[in-house]
Amino acid sequence: MRRPGLRYRVAAAFAAGALALSASMAALSYEFTSQALIAGRERNALRSAYLDASVVHAGLSTERPDIPGALRTLNTGSTRRALLHREGRWYARAADAGLTDAIPPGLQDLVEQGEISMQRVSTDSGPAVVVGVPLPSSSGFYVIDSMRELDQTLRTLALVLTLVAAGTTAAGAGFGWYLTRRVLRPLDTVTAAAREITAGDLDARLDPATEPDLERLTTSFNEMVDQLSARLERDRRFAADVSHELRSPLQTLSAATSVLDRHRDRLDDRTATAVTLLSGEVTRFQRLVTDLLELARDDQPVRRAPVDVADLAREECQARGLPPEVVRVDGGSAATWSIDRRRFAQILGNLLDNAERHGGGAIAVRLGQAPDAFVLEVDDEGPGVRPEDRIAIFDRFVRGRAASARGDSDGTGLGLALVARHAVAHGGQVTVTDRPGGGARFRVELPRTQP
């Protein structure tokens, strides 16, 4: 499973932190606020119950007390219900709608023992608080004070705090994403410079003054590029010098071999065989020197220009004795590409030569386009390439099925390496897969524009 990117992880961390902080603050705020509101409401209920109990007690002090009348004199409003328990009977201002069932037995016992008690209960109309006040003559006065409005207020408060926590979490995630973009912006510059270097522009450098906090990184990066550039330049000069130095004796050797080859009929069999072997090796040596020279100049930037790739492909095929019908342009694909003509010609030529030496010859050269790239495919009818060799064959001096080993064919081991180098120089890539029906299919993708 692919690990999420740094930006996603940082944004998720900020979101988690904001969620934890906002949820904690919301929970604490709700707890303190609800406790304060409930405690205040209970104090008001207890104070009101005391006042109502004193009024009822005054009404019961007469010789013939009117209990219902005394209860009706109470100003209880719409949220409070008053009850009186006297001599085993319950009295209320109106018909008892199950109010007596809302009074807990334990609270009644405490009131009967002469203790003022209060308890929160749940009724059919919602939460309420019951206050019991003992009166003389074994009487008990009870007030059921509804807390429905307070409960609705607390629900609204919980919803608001939840929305605030969700908004804070979203804001934390957004801030984390924005912060990572700002923090990683210098790394994007490093990435862009690295891409330019990969594409062959060894003059790409970073400005240490752009981001003072990353001065050590930019300085180290520039030093690394300087050393890499110097090493590549040394390698290029070495390859070019060696190749140039080898060309003169090779030309002499090739001329001498050509003279011997023309007089082969005058030579005995052993000498003629030796001349044939020598001629083949000289030809292979010349190709090797040519490929080394091409590698030496591979660091030059890509020079894109409109190229009629269909005509170019037919020319390359004709030079190798292949019929022009081998080249196919996919329907709807333009035959004019913006590419480096020299590099593309060598890409196609090397793939055709590889198909000739190892795949029985090319049977199809297709030119097409992907959404963002030009596509070249070369099919052969050989044994194909084993999956474990499909990366190694693009390394230098690797040939045929014996990946990472020197083969005994007449190739130089640099052809496919040059194909890969030219594709990378365009910002593209080359891959090899199995062709349906047998054989290998080499696929080169070149971006429409230089990355």
Image: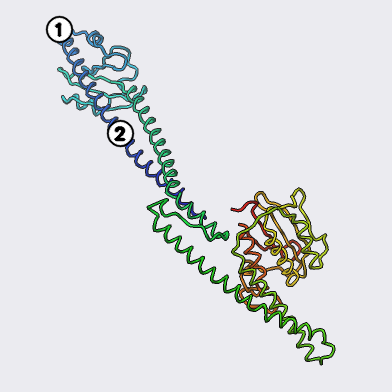
85 vs 324: above or below = above
Question: How far from the left and from the top, in percent, is residue 350?
Answer: 71, 67
The numbered mark at residue 176 is: none
| Residue at mark 1 to residue at mark 2: CA–CA distance | 54 Å
Q: Quadrant of residue 168?
A: top left
Name the residue: 51% across, 57% down. Answer: 204
Q: Residue furthest right?
A: 265
Name the residue: 42% across, 49% down. Answer: 183
The three-letter amino acid code for the residue at tag 2 is: Ser
Secondary element under disc 2, as helix, strand or loop, is helix
Q: Quadrant of residue 160?
A: top left
Answer with mark 1 or mark 2, whichever residue precedes in sequence.
2
Of 432 and 156, which appears nearest the observer? 432
Q: Residues within 10 Å of mark 1 (few under 14, many from 20)?
A: few
The three-letter amino acid code for the residue at tag 1 is: Glu
Reading the image, the residue beneath label 1 is 63
- 209 sits left or right of 244 in the view: left
Name the residue: 80% across, 61% down. Answer: 326
